[in-house]
Amino acid sequence: MTTPPAPNDPDPGLHDAALFAHVARLRAALRKRPGDLESLRDAFAGRTVLLLSCGPSLNRWREVYDALPERPVVACVKQAIDRIDVPCHLHFLNSQNLQRFRYRRSRRPLQVFSASKGSLWFADPDLLLNVGVPPGHDLRHSLAATGDFAAEALIDVDRPRRWGPGIMYETVFHTLALLGVRRIVTVGWDIADGAAANTHFYDTAAPAAKPAPPVRPRFMPARWLARNLGLTRFCKFWLHVTGRRYNPASMIEGEAQAVAAAVPSLVRWLDSLGIELQIVSDSAWQPGTSGPSAAVGSSGHSAHPAPARTAAAQPRLTTP
């Protein structure tokens, strides 16, 4: 399947139409042959991907987008798609911090969804991947601990994927590698806040925009109803159809440290595939940064323990 060329000075409308026509062909191929990863191989060969995640640094996405020398393929993680005003071509979701997303029919992205066995979610993804979460969420069995990203190459949808922890390690980078991209620029992949906890760009929004609280029946009769009549499932389905977030997630002890320490291994794996990784983040958890970070290439990464968050600085985008 031929990838639309990256235009140098494109007509935005024509560029978007060509990309979404290409995405529509990929989606149609997956609908015809569910789980056929070969239909995605090198589908965006040689392209630059702007990968937008949900950390507070996502608020810098526009200056990064405008600084890129070519119009990128835009990939969004979960609610990042609601923060931007340009088309999103690839949308990554999992069963945590989930909500219903509405797409324009002519601008529907390729949706990649990952979930663990027994998780409760409602979606109709183009590609569904299974994540094998170890008992007790033991970080020793995570990809962040092993650092063996090559072993988790995306070659079989039926094989449970190693727990990240987190969607970026479990599915996002491996899917982009399968698609054949040559450069990934991340914005908003902040890993954690200064207290090693989940942090999102929408956490400072109005209370109404925050995730809905989980359904936890307080009394025994209510628990019995939830277990026997599916009340919890119904309530979460209602949150889904009304567009509210459900299945909120929190980080476990040591998760932020493990994810940050594994970034150099990720960079080495991507580099072996000829893929450049650049990171734009205000988070001091990103290896190789001194406080709030600029976009850095593979040579700029080094593992270090969790540092204290420093004063804000303006990010800059480094280009080859």
Image (cartoon, rainbow, N blue to C red):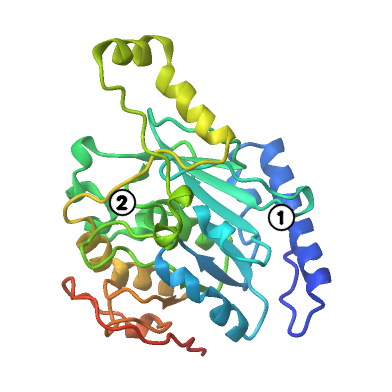
Name the kind of residue labelled 1 in the image: Val
- Where on the picture, by quarter, is residue 161? top left
In the picture, the disc for residue 23 is 1
Q: Residue at x 57, y 43 (%)?
A: 127
What SS does tag 2 mark? loop
For this rendering, which residue is in front, 207 or 88?
Answer: 207
Residue 240 visible here: yes
Q: Residue at x 16, y 72 (%)?
A: 305
Q: Does 239 appear above or below 182? A: above
Residue 192 x, y percent position in the rendering: 29, 63
> In the figure, is residue 8 to the left or right of 84?
right
Q: Residues within 10 Å of mark 2 (few under 14, many from 20)?
A: many
Q: Does 318 appear above or below 110? A: below
User: What residue sits right under mark 2 in the picture?
Assistant: 165
What SS does tag 1 mark? helix
Q: Residue at x 60, y 57 (%)?
A: 90
Q: Residues within 10 Å of mark 1 (few under 14, many from 20)?
A: many
* Discs 2, 1 touching: Cβ within 8 Å: no
Residue 88 x, y percent position in the rendering: 64, 61
In the picture, the disc for residue 35 is none
For this rendering, which residue is in front, 7 or 218?
Answer: 218
Residue 213 x, y percent position in the rendering: 37, 38
Q: CA distance from mark 2 to mark 1?
A: 28 Å
Residue 273 visible here: no
Name the kind of residue labelled 2 in the image: Pro
Q: Residue at x 18, y 44 (%)?
A: 138
For this rendering, which residue is in front, 34 or 96?
Answer: 96
- Where on the picture, by quarter, is residue 47? bottom right
> In the figure, is residue 54 to the left or right of 251?
right
